[in-house]
Image (tube, grey):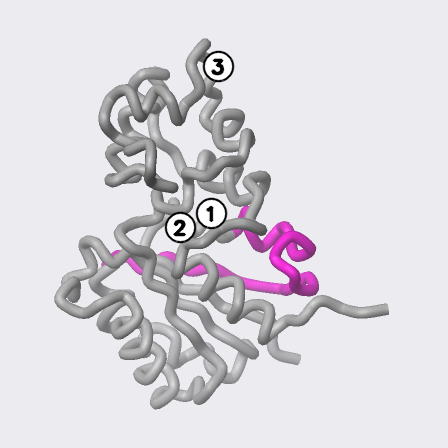
Amino acid sequence: MPTDLVLLTADKNIEHGLRGLLSRPKALGIRAVTSKIYVHSQRDPACARKAHEFLRQFADDYQHALVVFDHEGCGREERAPAQLEEDVRQQLAANGWEHRAQAVVIAPELEAWVFSASPHVETCLEWAGPVRLRNWLQDRGFWPEEQAKPVDPKAALEAALAALRRPRSSSIYENLGRSVGVGQCEDHAFNRLRTALQQWFPAETI
């Protein structure tokens, strides 16, 4: 019996973030799935251009495939994220996956998924200052008050971690994936990921 899902990611941070998310099938509105996550050694550009080559070997062993990478740094930034997702999906379809695979392009980068109104964000970052993280970032120009996310999420995260004197690590992304609420997330890439999972692995009904 084929395993449910194989995932190809561009780096360890995305891998661990997805690992955390997949540990919460109820929050995602899906049944529990069996999965295997691979990280491409050539990172985002290879995921954008060669995902079909890497995943071709697994077409008979898994029911579905997901490719997840950042738009920024992928080498195909001239293509809008939705267009690039469709490009990769079509290549996968022509290489053994037919309608069983999807691509998710995060714009600009994974850090766009980090920031939300959830108090778990501060907990995962071990932010314990007297000022709320969002207010601290607003005071330093990273997070305009009228916007739902920082203008440059990666720079905002790096500034917060630098203030904490804490190195960035994949465990942060896994902890966020395991704990931050997902119900109100409006990010296009995240919702595309969740929709694909819900279509492939609908929640079991009693």
Tell me how far mark 1 sits from mark 2, CA to CA: 5 Å
- Is residue 24 rendered magenta in the image? yes
Residue 165 place in picture, x, y as percent: 33, 16
Q: Amino acid at mark 2?
A: Ile
Q: Nearer the viewer, residue 134 or 47?
A: 134
Residue 171 place in picture, x, y as percent: 46, 36
What secondary structure is marked by label 1?
Answer: helix
Earlier in the chain: of badge 3 and badge 2, it is: 2
For the point 27% across and 25% down, the residue is 159
For the point 53% across and 35% down, the residue is 118
Nearest to viewer (mark 1 / mark 3): 3
Tell me how far mark 1 sits from mark 3, CA to CA: 22 Å
Residue located beneath label 3 in the image: 128
Residue located beneath label 2 in the image: 14
Q: Residues within 10 Å of mark 3 (few under 14, many from 20)?
A: few
Location of residue 38 with respect to 173 vertically, above or below: below
- Is residue 68 rendered magenta in the image? no
Residue located beneath label 1 in the image: 17
* Mark 1 in CB contact with mark 2 (< 8 angstroms): yes
Q: Which mark is residue 141?
A: none
What's drawn in magenta, residue-wise? 19-43
User: Where on the picture, by quarter, is residue 33?
Assistant: bottom right
For the point 30% across and 39% down, the residue is 153
Q: Residues within 10 Å of mark 2 (few under 14, many from 20)?
A: many
Residue 77 place in picture, x, y as percent: 16, 62
Location of residue 43 with respect to 148 vertically, above or below: below
Q: Amino acid at mark 3?
A: Ala
For the point 51% across and 84% down, the residue is 60
